[in-house]
Every structure is written in C-alpha cells, then in structure tokens.
Image (cartoon, rainbow, N blue to C red):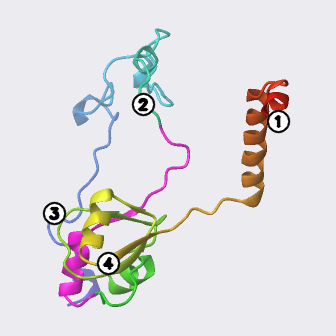
C-alpha cells in the first residue's frame, strides 16, 4: 500500500447538489424555493404571522395555569420500596430518606425532594422521611408497622412576621369599636 493508492470506500463521499446553477442541473431557475415572494428570499421569519390578520394563537381562548416556579419531585411507590428491600438494595431497619435512596441506586438525583405514592404493597416495617405522601401510602406503611415523617417547609422569619401582621390587621378590621366594651 502506498499513499497514492489510499481512497475512501465506495459511496462514502457524496457530492452535494449545487442549486441555482442553470437549467441543466435540475435545480436551476428557482433553486427549489418555489415561486417568487417572501418565502423565496432569505431572512424570512413568518412563524405565526398571518399577513396582519389576528393569528390563530391569539384568536383562541387561553386555558389553564402554569405555575411560576414548579417543583419537580422524585416519585416512588411503596411497592418499589418493598422490591428494593427484598433485593437487598435497601436496608429496611435503617431510616429511609432521599439520600439513602440515591445511595442505594433507586433514585438517580435529588431534584426538589421525594413524593411517596401508594401503588403496590409493603410488608416491611420502615421509617421513611419524605416531602409529600399520599394518604394511601401513609396508610400502607403505618399498617405494616412503619412510620412516615413529612419534611416541613422552612418559612423565612420575615415572611412569617408579615403573615402574622396581616392576620392581626384582618382581625382588627372584623371587630367593631363597641364590641370590645360589651364583652367586658
């Protein structure tokens, strides 16, 4: 083998179609862009534009609600926990939380927390700490002799103070000036 004998496999190099190079090329005249007008030219950004007519996405009514900062939780069923305990990936005697589930390889990453769902059956007595738990899941774990601990959301002290003040103002507005004297 010599350097001048090296070549690609047959069909490995495909020559590109050179458009707009005359009628004999098969892609001449319009160059595959159809007739004249806006779309035949470069820099077209039509998107939902309908020539000044009210576009469809604005004519249709809006529905629903999109949460401003949605939280994404890991969801796990009680049946999956039981399966992990049976497969000896999870130790049921120790407290189960998000970190232990990640360490066991049952959940890949932490996300915003853990949500426990009630699909499946659990026989093992486990103590689990979660952000949310469905009523069915709570019932199933407590029936097996275990316990579910919910992580309380931390509220800033300043926010708590604001809430108390607004509650006090509402309570003060609700009372009549003469009502306080008559109670004594």
Where on the picture, by quarter, is residue 55? top left
Question: Which x, y percent locates residue 90?
Answer: 29, 87
Are there few (<14), some (14-19), or many (20+) residues within 10 Å of tag 3? few
Helix, strand or loop at mark 3: loop
Foreground: disc 2 or disc 4: 4
Residue linked to disc 1? 184
Tell me if label 2 and label 4 are in contact, CB under 8 Å. no
Q: Nearer the viewer, residue 132 or 106?
A: 132
The quarter of the picture where the N terminus appears is bottom left
Picture disc at residue 122: none
Helix, strand or loop at mark 1: loop
Q: Distance between the residues labelled 1 and 2?
A: 51 Å
Q: Is residue 144 left or right of residue 41?
A: left
Residue linked to disc 2? 64
Position above or below: 74 against 2: above
Tell me which label, 4 or 1, sits earlier in the chain: 4
Where on the picture, by quarter, is residue 89? bottom left
Tell me which label, 2 or 4, sits earlier in the chain: 2
Residue linked to disc 4? 146
* Residue 71 within the magenta-colored segment of the rendering: yes
Question: Which x, y percent locates residue 146?
Answer: 32, 78
Tell me which label, 3 or 1, sits earlier in the chain: 3
Residue linked to disc 3? 11
- Report the magenta residues as a range: 66-89
């Amino acid at each position: 083998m010599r350097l001048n004998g090296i070549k690609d496999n047959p069909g490995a190099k495909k020559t590109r179609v050179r458009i707009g190079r005359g009628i004999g090329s098969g892609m001449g005249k319009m160059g595959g862009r159809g007739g004249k007008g806006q779309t035949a030219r470069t820099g077209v950004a039509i998107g939902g534009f309908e020539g000044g007519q009210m576009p469809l996405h604005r004519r249709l009514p809006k529905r629903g609600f999109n949460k401003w900062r949605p939280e994404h939780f890991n969801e796990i069923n009680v049946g999956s926990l039981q399966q992990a305990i049976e497969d000896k990936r999870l130790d049921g005697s120790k407290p189960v939380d998000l970190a232990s589930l990640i360490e066991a390889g049952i959940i890949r990453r932490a996300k915003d927390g853990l949500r426990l769902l009630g699909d499946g059956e659990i026989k093992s007595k486990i103590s689990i700490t979660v952000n949310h738990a469905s009523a069915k899941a709570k019932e199933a774990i407590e029936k097996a002799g275990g316990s579910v601990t919910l992580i309380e959301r931390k509220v800033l002290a300043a926010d708590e103070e604001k809430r108390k003040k607004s509650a006090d103002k509402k309570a003060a507005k609700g009372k009549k000036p003469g009502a306080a004297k008559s109670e004594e």
